[in-house]
Image (cartoon, grey):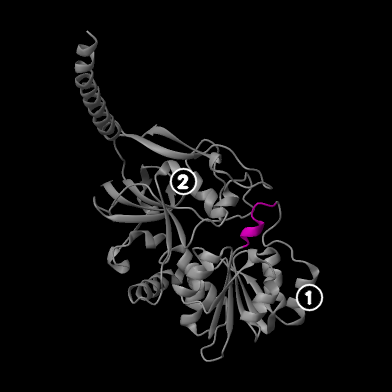
Amino acid sequence: MHSQKNKVQPETDEITKGLFLKWAEWRSAAVVVMGIIQRAVLHSRPGKNSEPVAENFCVEEASLADGITDGQVKVRTLYLSVDPYMRCRMNEDTGADYLLPWKLGEAADGGGIGVVEESKYGSFTAGDTVCSFNWPWQTRAIVEGKILQKLHPELVGGHLSYFLGAVGMPGLTALFGVKEKGHVTLGAGQTMVVSGAAGACGSLAGQIGRLEGCSRVVGISGSDEKCSILVSELGFDAAVNYKGGNLAQKLHECCPAGVDVYFDNVGGDVSDIVISQMNQNSHVILCGQISQYNKDVPYPPPLPSRTEAALRDKNITRDRFLVLWYADKHEAGILQLSQWVREGKLKVRETVTKGLENIGAAFQSMMKGGNIGKQIVLVSEE
């Protein structure tokens, strides 16, 4: 009897395995046929003075309507973007009149890319690749066609995710920051410093500074690995790990002639040190202040009196800017960025996290500097 049981068991296991696989196949098909989707919702708010964690988000199943109405488009999500500005959207009050807070229990949204599955909006047909800055964090979605923009994959050599980074909002932010606020002059021998230099925007800003005419570009980042990549892959002349201590001394060694242009992504102590070494009539490009985003302070945050004095005494400009202010230049900017990418003049780094279920972890990691280049979430394959 015992030997007979052992003989039958493998067959039973194979039957069970087969039934499980059939169930999994049915489940997968049912999810599509029945309109069951996954969505990432804001589960809790971290509070204005706390760091966000992955558990602030949760992924749940929801149903999608069977049909669409005039003006609507049904899309399948390919890529989603997580960005530092989203931190303020986790608060009940974003502190910015152009940004709405995410609502608890509802799908978050941001930059996204996907494929049109069905359209009742004249500009799009099934199979088109589209993007939006208000893309729901869902595997599939029904959206108003007017929020979508058709993409041309040939601009980026088929690398669609670049439209969320180097040829998207971070790229435009870096480009317009340097061109509109950096006052870079070809042949003037200017030294540019970039903080948060290995991030989505900083990694591009340093390269653009060089392309626009800076003679020396120095990055500030948070690890030796990032500093190495900045110099060996992205064309920075030098890079400093601010966590290694003696930042002021190391920065002076890298910028013996002082700093003429500072692309500021971080704020706080790092920026105070950079500003203290800036030259007369130099320029701060005020892009971001990520070191201050988990604090209940106004934007831009107040500066120490010694930093305010340095700005005043050296006639240093430090103007806030938003990429939204240059909407009339976006198309030309995208064409310029994509040309640089295709020509190999603008190197692109990405950190890709797979699965919508991991978007909370990707956001937490990005806020802590865990990414190199643009942080992307891959939701489904192209």
Mark 2 neighbour class, 10 Å CA radius: few under 14, some 14 to 19, many 20 or more: many
User: Which segment did they paint magenta?
Assistant: 289-295
Q: Is residue 293 magenta?
A: yes
Residue at 65% of width from left, 51% of height from top? 294
What element does badge 2 sit on? Answer: helix
Q: Is 324 placed above or below 28 here?
A: below
Q: Nearer the viewer, residue 265 or 32?
A: 265
Residue at 27% of width from left, 53% of height from top? 122
Does any portion of residue 73 appear in the rendered image? no
**Amino acid of disc 2:** Ile
Q: Is residue 284 left or right of residue 18?
A: right
User: Which numbered disc covers residue 309?
Assistant: 1
Residue at 49% of width from left, 49% of height from top? 362
User: x and y percent of residue 61 in the render?
Assistant: 40, 32
Q: Is residue 44 left or right of residue 157?
A: right
First in sequence: mark 1 vs mark 2: 1
The residue to which callout 2 is attached is 359
Foreground mark, 1 or 2, reads 2
